[in-house]
Image (cartoon, rainbow, N blue to C red):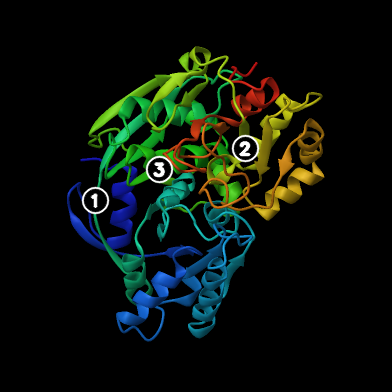
Amino acid sequence: MGETVIEKIIRNNVGHAVKPGDIVTVNVDRVMIHDIFIPFVAEKFEEMGFQKLWDPDKVVLIYDHLVPASQLDDTRHFHEGDAFAEKYGMKNVHRSDGICHQLMTEAGYVKPGNIVFGTDSHTTTYGCVGAFSSGIGYTEMASILGTGTMWIKVPETIKVVIDGELPNNVMSKDVILRLIGDLGADGATYRALEFTGSAVKNMSVASRMTIANMAIEAGAKCALFTPDEKTAEYCEIELNEFQKSLVGDEDAKYLKTVTYRAEDLVPVMACPSQVDKIRDVSTLEGTEIDQVFIGSCTNGRLEDLAAAAEVLKGKKVADYVKLIVTPASRKIYRQAIELGILDTLAEAGAMITHPGCGLCCGRAGGILTDGERVVATNNRNFLGRMGTSKVEIYLASPKTAAACAVAGKIVSPK
């Protein structure tokens, strides 16, 4: 019997073949903790009686949700995080270098075939390079810090095949939103999503990151892409034989297969206030908006900013509409400056912020109030996510979002 990608990764880690439903204990390759959870992780770690980290070099602490601080208690998280890192010899600490899920692959912490856990649900992002990555709570994280191991149930796999060439106005964000709409918000609960097909092979690593990031919105335990030449270049490695083998076998057993013809896909949006409430943008045109947000761990990468700049070049943001742009990392911010992308966005009227999670998680940097409507490129549109519970959030691709900013209402990108 052949194997799916997730089964191959787990087999390589535990040393024997596995099948869906098996309970196994894996050796963890890397963990990520962000600033919101570090005080709780630290408290639980010491409560459990651990005296040292299993491997300080495999632990990454990232300050991203609470920077710059917007509430008085935020600074407590920084102080407690720094104290914990110093006490236990942690060197991999990022203080406002960017969003955690961008940094984990950008800074080289995650490689194809790794098993990685993080204290954030969108840890699924690292599947873009062929890693099994998933979010956990602070108690589980404290246990990993002390033991270096984690028990998991081997998930079933849903295979997603996308063949053909995406239309010019369709981005990978439209692809994953369409899939979430078709599967439902719980349609992939505790299952692996394995992506393949000619359209997937043609995607950049950044585009794959967008899809892997939002896999959790269908309940997925992880999302996986086969490592290829683009992966190797991005990770600055040469793929070994194991990493090259991370492709689903033809005779592997899948729960089901979902197939798309890329040319049939169109720009879509997730409508308030459910991520799986997907509608074609064309059916929503004319809906007035108050704000547009381009950024987050979903769509704050260089290609996203470039796509928005292409739409906005020579145009102006509509009157009374705020356009907020947040690059996903300091590196992307600098690259966007060097390429003139931020100039184009600024000239169009965008407000460009420091890399971070503030607006996406409703902490700072453009939160909204009752009756306001926002088109955003982040990953969730739940009630109260970006302000009060009476804010309407529409999720869209960077191209669609930029077009809406110019029009002052929902429109399809041209």
Looking at this view, is 379 or 12 the one in front?
A: 379
Ranked by sequence position, the earlier of labels 1 and 3 is: 1
Q: CA distance from mark 1 to mark 3?
A: 14 Å
Task: Residue type at mark 2: give it.
Answer: Ile
Q: Are marks 2 and 3 in contact (CB under 8 Å)?
A: no
Q: Residues within 10 Å of mark 2 (few under 14, many from 20)?
A: many
- Kindly identify the residue that appears in the image at 52 percent across and 67 percent down: 61
Q: Are marks 1 and 2 in contact (CB under 8 Å)?
A: no
Ranked by sequence position, the earlier of labels 1 and 2 is: 1
Q: Quadrant of residue 306?
A: top right
Look at discs 1 and 2 and give the one toward the viewer.
2
Q: CA distance from mark 1 to mark 2?
A: 35 Å
Image quarter hosting the N terminus: top left
Q: CA distance from mark 2 to mark 3?
A: 25 Å
Q: Which residue is mark 2?
A: 294
Task: Residue type at mark 3: give it.
Answer: Leu
Residue 293 image label: none
Looking at this view, is 360 or 389 the one in front?
A: 389
